[in-house]
Image: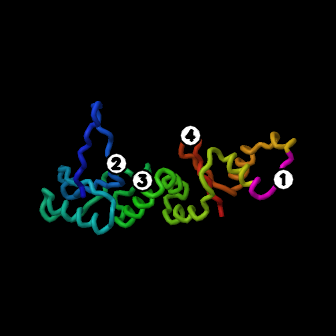
Amino acid sequence: MTDQPTPVAPLGTAVAPAVKTGPRIYVACLAAYNSGILHGRWIRATTPDEIKAEVSAMLAESPVPQAEEWAIHDYEGFEGVSLSECASFETVCDLAAFLSEHGSLGAKLHRHFGGRLEEARAAFEDYAGQYKTAADFAEEMIRETGTEIPASLEYYIDWQALARDMALNGEILVFQTGFDEVHIFWSR
């Protein structure tokens, strides 16, 4: 589980592509750490039971006898979301699964809701879709409601201003995840 795959450089190149391993945490033995010895293990965030087994094995191999305490000293693959050094393995795995499914959009939602994972999950129930711009969303929404816009007025409508007002009024949440890529959620 903690073995790192060895990347191989494709023919004609000098550098191997980075291997994506998914979210993982570095768990350190605190008894060793407090004795000035770095001892720990990178562990993939799969299931709480697998992490517990890996931590138990790491503690059993500690240079300090009868080591029992651990802490999360590092992590990667969590899309910039912060983890506490004493986060439960259940929390780590739930967050890892959510971010593996939703990527940077999930991380932005998680931060928007102040780190409350359940609220970030619930937001996907009100997902309106991905658009090039929020203005595209506003225009599509108005046109789909059946509102007839006379051709002579079409070029005078400021769809970007309408989308901005919808966001400022709390009707929608807008998250930009790339160039020409925004995700819209209804605020309910």
Identify which residue, 12 or 108, lies in the foreground: 12
Q: What residue type is labelled 3?
A: Ser
User: Distance between the Cα atoms at labels 1 and 2?
Assistant: 49 Å
Label disc, if present, on residue 82 of the rendered structure: 3
Residue segment shown in magenta: 142-150
Q: Quadrant of residue 58?
A: bottom left
Q: Mark 4 points at which residue?
A: 179
Of marks 4 and 1, the one in the foreground: 1
User: Distance between the Cα atoms at labels 2 and 3?
Assistant: 19 Å
Q: What residue type is labelled 4?
A: Phe
Q: Name the residue: 74% across, 45% down.
A: 159
Q: Mark 2 points at which residue?
A: 20
Residues marked 3 and 1 touching at CB (< 8 Å): no
Q: What element carries label 4?
A: loop
* Earlier-in-chain disc, 3 versus 4: 3
Considering only vertical position in the picture, is 31 above or below 149?
A: below
User: Distance between the Cα atoms at labels 4 and 2?
Assistant: 23 Å
Of marks 3 and 4, the one in the foreground: 4
In which quadrant will I find the C terminus?
A: bottom right
What is the count of numbered marks? 4
Q: Quadrant of residue 34?
A: bottom left
